[in-house]
């Protein structure tokens, strides 16, 4: 990411929170609609991804779904820029959640909880709720360039009460730190619907081959933590979340099966709220091996 883009993010954090919410929403919605009309690489990738999620959609329906998807993604960023200026109690009160008892039960067992998420809805708002209800949790962030942008993202999420671990370049391996937190009976949140590197666990996802990160299942197998898939989506005036029952792992040999079970839950959740899945990158093996951006 260029220095110009980093400066634009910094300007967003400073200025967007000063706008009335209605004005900020209108501005970001207009930007999303422009991006949908422009049909740049990100919009086209989103279209190809959503075509797998909603295979019965015709061209016009898919056009509208992409527009709504970009509006949802723009809403996430608008809310992220405004989040530091919003009362955290208000944020938590506007989140409707089901399945919270699975988190409480996992912590009662004493081995920690791994929440596996998709790139959907507003995970920062859900994080604010989690901090208020269960204390600080640990998550991994991709190291961005330039470094100033990465530092800004870390400061932003730390200001919300998160414990941030860089995916690379930290003092210790991320997996070691996460396992340590789980052994302290903490919550670890991992976005698990896209493999960033060349590894990953082969799964069937919406009927096609893909590779998803195995880290969530691996940590659960290594520490005995509960593995809980979770879904996030937007509502008209706030956010919603659903925590699913635990996925059994049982040991290292169960990682592949557990990751496939995560993929199945993710697919159902994404299909239920396709416009709120902010996936503007390749996911499926055919796209990644074909060089699709």
Image (cartoon, grey):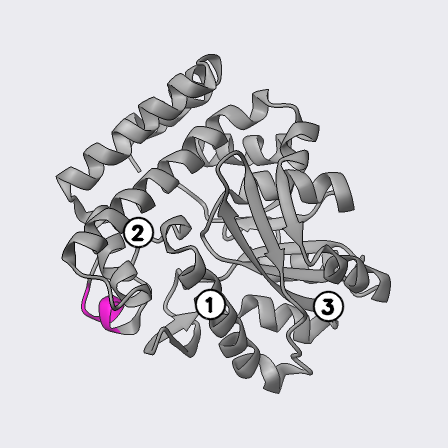
Which quarter of the rendering shows the N terminus?
Answer: top left
Q: CA distance from mark 2 to mark 1?
A: 19 Å
- Magenta highlight on residue 60: no
Which-is-in-front pick, marks 3 and 1? 1
**Position of residue 243 in the picture relative to residue 20 (left or right):** right
Q: Which residue is mark 2?
A: 280
| Total numbered circles | 3
Q: Residue furthest bottom?
A: 253
**Position of residue 257 in the picture relative to residue 14 (left or right):** right
Q: CA distance from mark 3 to mark 1?
A: 24 Å
Which residues are drawn in magenta?
A: 286-291
Q: Residue at x 58, y 20 (%)?
A: 85
Q: Secondary structure at mark 1?
A: helix
Query: What's the magenta bit mostly, secondary-structure-wise?
Result: helix
Q: Which residue is mark 3?
A: 225
Residue 173 in view here: no
How crowded is the residue under tag 3: few (<14 C-alpha within 10 Å), some, or many (20+)? many
How crowded is the residue under tag 1: few (<14 C-alpha within 10 Å), some, or many (20+)? some
Q: Secondary structure at mark 2?
A: loop
**Position of residue 227 in the picture relative to residue 213 (left or right):** right
In which quadrant of the rendered view does residue 186 lie?
bottom right
In the depicted view, which residue is nearer to us: 43 or 111?
Answer: 43
In which quadrant of the rendered view does residue 110 lie?
bottom right
Q: Which residue is mark 1?
A: 268
Which quarter of the rendering shows the C terminus?
Answer: bottom left
In the depicted view, which residue is nearer to us: 61 or 188?
Answer: 61
Q: Residue at x 25, y 68 (%)?
A: 56
Tell me which label, 3 or 1, sits earlier in the chain.
3
């Amino acid at each position: 990411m260029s220095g110009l883009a980093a400066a634009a993010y910094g300007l967003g954090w400073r200025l967007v929170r000063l706008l009335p919410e209605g004005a900020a929403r209108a501005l970001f919605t207009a930007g999303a609609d422009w991006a949908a009309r422009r049909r740049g690489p990100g919009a086209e990738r989103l279209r190809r991804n959503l075509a797998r999620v909603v295979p019965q959609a015709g061209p016009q329906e898919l056009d509208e779904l992409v527009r709504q998807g970009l509006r949802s993604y723009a809403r996430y960023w608008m809310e992220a820029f405004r989040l530091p200026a919003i009362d955290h109690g208000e944020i938590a009160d506007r989140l409707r959640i089901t399945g919270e008892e699975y988190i409480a039960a996992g912590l009662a067992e004493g081995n920690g909880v791994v929440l596996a998420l998709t790139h959907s809805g507003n995970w920062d708002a859900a994080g604010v709720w989690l901090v208020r209800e269960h204390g600080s949790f640990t998550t991994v962030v991709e190291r961005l360039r330039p470094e100033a942008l990465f530092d800004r993202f870390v400061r932003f999420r730390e200001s919300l009460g998160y414990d941030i671990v860089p995916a690379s370049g930290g003092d210790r391996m991320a997996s070691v730190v996460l396992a340590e937190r789980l052994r302290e009976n903490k919550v670890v949140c991992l976005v698990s619907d896209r493999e960033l590197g060349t590894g990953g666990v082969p799964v069937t996802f919406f009927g096609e081959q893909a590779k998803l990160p195995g880290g969530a299942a691996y940590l659960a197998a290594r520490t005995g933590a509960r593995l809980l898939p979770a879904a996030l989506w937007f509502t008209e005036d706030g956010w919603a979340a659903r925590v699913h029952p635990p996925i059994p792992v049982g040991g290292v040999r169960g990682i592949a099966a557990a990751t496939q079970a995560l993929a199945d839950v993710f697919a159902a959740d994404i299909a239920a709220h396709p416009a709120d899945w902010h996936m503007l990158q390749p996911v499926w093996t055919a796209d990644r091996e074909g060089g699709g951006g």
